[in-house]
Amino acid sequence: MTDITELESRLSAALDRIGQGLDRLESAGPRTAQDEGLGAELDAQQQANAELEERLKALREEQDTRLAAFEARIEAQNAQMADLDGQLQALRRSNAELREVAGELREAMEAELADPALIDRAMAAELDALRAERDAEVAELGAVLSELKPLVEERK
């Protein structure tokens, strides 16, 4: 970013010098040897100005490309975090249901009332909790892998 600022200031200074040279040329009468020297200097300054403008354009394009890549990466990370958050919420709900069913099952066992439907419900809640836990782990691993992938590619 400091390169762009430096180039812009150099470009402004060059344009000012060109403008001053043009003003001197317009105010002077017929061309003299000094005018020819100024004309050559003007041409050199215009060439330097064109080169600086090209460098500035290239730097801005590079900066825009990098910015777009960073924005895309941030967007992908935000999507992964949203997915991971959804998986964790599902895991919390499944665990809450599992605790509730386990408590009911414990009460039924204490009262010596074995209810097959309650046992089935407990097993289903446990399976849901395991699935939710697995989905959360998969989402977490996906987030970790997406962070590691650019690092591995850089090393190649």
Image (spheres, rainbow, N blue to C red):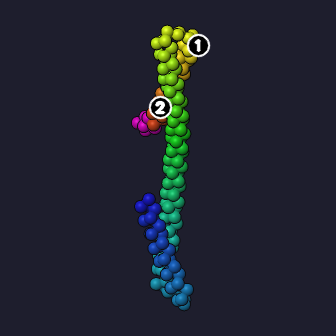
Residue 29 appearing in the image: yes
Position of the C terminus, as image quadrant, is top left
Give percent across and percent down for residue 151: 42, 37
Q: Residue at x 52, y 64 (%)?
A: 53
Give percent across and percent down for residue 29: 54, 90
The amino acid type of the residue labelled 2 equals Glu
State the residue in front, 138 or 86: 86
Q: Which residues are magenta?
A: 148-156
Q: What residue would you read off at disc 2?
A: 140
Quote the CA–CA distance across marks 2 and 1.
34 Å
Give percent across and percent down for residue 66: 50, 50
Secondary element at tag 1: helix
State the image quarter where residue 83 is shown. top right
Give percent across and percent down for residue 87: 53, 31
Whether 56 is among the magenta residues is no
Q: What residue would you read off at disc 1?
A: 117
State the residue in front, 21 or 84: 84
